[in-house]
Amino acid sequence: MGVILKYVVAGLLRYWLINLDYWQTIANRVEIATPLNSWKRLIEGVYLYDHNINPYEGDSFHESPIMLVFFYYIMKKVPFILPVLFTFLDLLTAHLLYKTSKAFIRILKESQEKQLAEVADESKPMLLDDAQLKESAEYVLSVYLFNPYSVLNCAGMTTTVIQNLLVATALWGASSGQRIVACVFIALATHQALYPVLLIVPIALILAEVNKGCTKCSYIRTLLVFVLSWGFLIYLSAYIMDGSYKYVYNTYGFILTVPDLKPNIGLFWYFFTEMFEHFRVLFVCAFQINALALYVIPLTLRFKKDPILLATVLIALSSIFRSYPCVGDVGFYLALLPMWKHLFTFMQQKFIVGCTFIITSALGPTVWHLWIYSGSANANFFFGVTLSFATAQIFLITDLLFAYIKREFTLKHGSSRQVDGKPAKLVLR
Amino acid sequence: MDFLRRFLSYCIFFTFFLCVRCDEFREELFFKPLPSTHLYSYFQFVTLVDSEVSSFHSHLAPRSLAEVVSRFQVEELHLTLTEGQWRHHQWGYPVLDAAPGAELYAWFSPDVTDVDTQWKKLSATLSGLFCASLNFIDSFNTVTPQMALWPMGAVKSSQNVTSQLRYASLPREIVCTENLTPWKKLLPCESSRGFSALLNSRMIHNTNYHSVGVHVRKVCKSSDCLETQLEFKQTVALIYDYDIIKSNDWSFRKLFGQGLPGACPLSTDSKIYVDVTSNSTQPFTLSPPPDNIILSQRGRTDTKLAVYNIHPDGKMINIGVKHKTKSQIPVSIHPPLFFNRYVLGYGKEFGGIVTEITNNCLAPINVVVLENAPWWLPIQLSTLRVNGEAESKLVQSQYYSPGRSRQKPYHLELLIKLPPKSTTTITIDFEFVFLKWQEYPPDANHGFYIGSALISANLPTARNYTSLPITGTTFDSVINDTKLWYPIVFRTNGAMVSLPTPDFSMPYNVICLACTVVALAFGPLHNICTKELVLKPSGTSLSLTQKLLNLFKKKKD
């Protein structure tokens, strides 16, 4: 009953915000709408497509052709359902995350039982019980439904709503062992925003763990299904655009080369505004490698045993370091964090991170207004805020990982911090 | 021997005579008092050349320009360099309208396949020829108008002219003496004799509006148009303000700082026209008296023109006007079509461009409006509103070519039927673009110029219309030229926006700070992935005094 009430309240809240007079203001906020996902650009793309002008000829539309055709038909046939549709899709994302987290917790429990032999006796009370686990799934749902970041993202009617739905579906598919669903949806998400391509690694690991049997065969099958469906989507998009692959420059090309320097909550915009021209390519490559390739392999090797944590961390890192991040991405990975509620006791920077989130969220719109509208601040103010927001997110993720390895250690060796009766410190070596 | 010499001299004389026959040069000057307190003076120097004659043996035609035209296979060329803004609603219409700053458009011959390369070469060459920054014309500020511009000269009717056309305007360009001097050098008499002697840069840059132009086109030699001639037309339009010359009585000496030292000896015809229509309402006398006064009926508009024939006798002429009564300000009657353009919005995030067009006639007028927004001002076609409506019935046809950042401007053309006695408002929204710091011009907070929109119309009435008919070369063609339509292309006023700027002084700081944040993630993640947790005995923590003592102990050892 309580769960249904949450859905209803969250749904009404979103629907009310979309129908608010201030909706335009929400939909145009730089924190919510980026050149990649904004509702304004989607409208423009559909309008051009409707008038037989190739939207990819210009610079105003960067969504995938599949999304273009999807919204074209909705806007042509049933434009009035759009507010309901966005609300519904976001609620569906929340529901899928809820189901996913339940399944994930089951997996967590199983792996905990497997490792029971290694757990030190004095750490036994630290083990998770059913009540705690059930609770965390509820938290996941509540956080996604009522986190202001995800609420505003949905109210702004950005395509990140769809993006989140696709990723959530893929995670749900993986957690319930449905390889086709997981791979197709992660391919759809990749086709839309490129960065979810990272998630194929944890998804392959989760699938192998859920569908017991030959692990390597499972990896290969997952990868194969993913590549095939991604390839098919690329082909399908070209088919929609009359066989032309030029859209790739406006979608993947736009994400990778960062030509639009409109401010957002990420690190790219001011960095590449102020970049010296002859270093631009070098740094674009460096930043994209940082977002796409750098952390996958080491983190996979380190957290192979816990692919769910790997998935959480990769989603978070890719939304911090992507070229056009928005608060919708932040809201999505924040919703996954309550699954790691049992790690919170080991985290050290919760307070600092929490304060920074609150302060930057308030300060961001303020300095933006000062810079753009009243002209009394300059770009550095907003840059400073985005910089500290990114720092807070990075602290949150690294703190979570440290908490995880500390808990791992404590489970194994007990919670006493003593060597031969002398006090000792936990250090990395 | 004697016979041979005589034969040779005959030959030389004959070829000389031929050449004189094949090149024809005329100079004309037109004055018109404009409401409320302005004077329009328009210089026109026309050279007609047989197209068959090679451009390398020009006689009176400017060879440098002829060479450019033939080398780049240009069919028609229009270049204007303008300072100031023509006020259509107040002054009526100029003979040739020009956009503020530099404006260049050209049609290339159908043989040219790679028009864009030719266009770039042409603009670069002209930039050298006129000392103007036309070399800044590139693909990102060039459009190909589909409906707004049509050739003024003779073209074969089967020819696809639109694909061979390129148009660019540089609203930021500042017109100065350095542009006028090379322009004068193209004239056969340069600035020593003839009307061009009046173009004293000290005086003409002192005006409210001045526009220097070069127009090259092909005109028919006869009515059946079997042969064509190349017409080089150099124009100067000046608007004087009576307030600046301190009285509404003007003379050459007051306007140009000197009298006219006779006509150019090389010209076949040198005439000065003064529009004396307003003489009936505001009596004035011309001195010296004109050679004759022509009454011209064009449409239903009567115009009285006083004509002077100027001879190359080197006598100083100082034409002037003296009003009988002082300080009478004529009421300006709005022309049949006028317009206004402005930028909407506040802040530096979103804005809109509004073009208001007023049809003052009793008949509907079809106009083509060309909006040419630079790439840093991305307009959104979905926000186009005509009189507040998204799908207006007034729009008969529409062409849109979306822009691309740093590559292509946004180009929108609308064919609109303006209802009689009405104002039509065209609104389109844009979003401000954040440029890279090196893309901002010096003095970035000065603002960015938006070029003017083109409005091309066929006016049903000749009220305020001063342009020459399309078939005419000189001003006599205006007289009694009644047509069904009077075609004209207007340029609206430009506009200016102020783009948001980054802090130009701190590229190093930004690079360092952003990289630091990335390193903040890299360091801990690297540690987590490569190191393991161990317990390390950490003795009892020492107090500060003990630490200091330890330091000394070490030193003693």
Image (cartoon, rainbow, N blue to C red):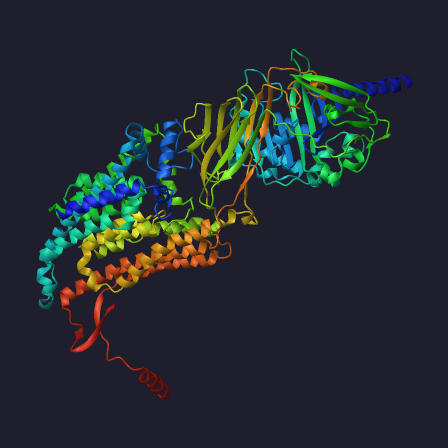
Q: Which residue of the protein is positioned furthest toward the bottom in this rendering?
A: B556
Q: Percent x, y for residue B549?
A: 33, 86
Along the horizontal axis of the image, is B331 left or right of B269? Answer: left
Q: Percent x, y for residue B95?
A: 66, 26
Along the horizontal axis of the image, is B130 left or right of A186? Answer: right
- At a point 65% along the width and 29% down the height, the residue shown is B332
Along the horizontal axis of the image, is A201 left or right of B174? Answer: left
Location of residue A194 (image quadrant): top left
Q: Nearer the viewer, residue B551 or A26?
A: A26
Q: Nearer the viewer, residue B532 or B426?
A: B426
Location of residue B494 (image quadrant): top right
Q: Percent x, y for residue B26?
A: 75, 24
| Vertical side of B18 occupied by B33: above or below | below
Q: Which residue of the protein is positioned furthest toward the top in this rendering?
A: B224
Q: Percent x, y for residue B513?
A: 41, 59
- At a point 23% along the width and 49% down the height, the residue shown is A144
| Vertical side of A100 occupied by B546: above or below | below
Asked if one can make out residue A337 in the rendered structure from this viewpoint, the answer is yes
> In which quadrant is the C terminus of chain A drawn?
bottom left
Location of residue A173 (image quadrant): top left
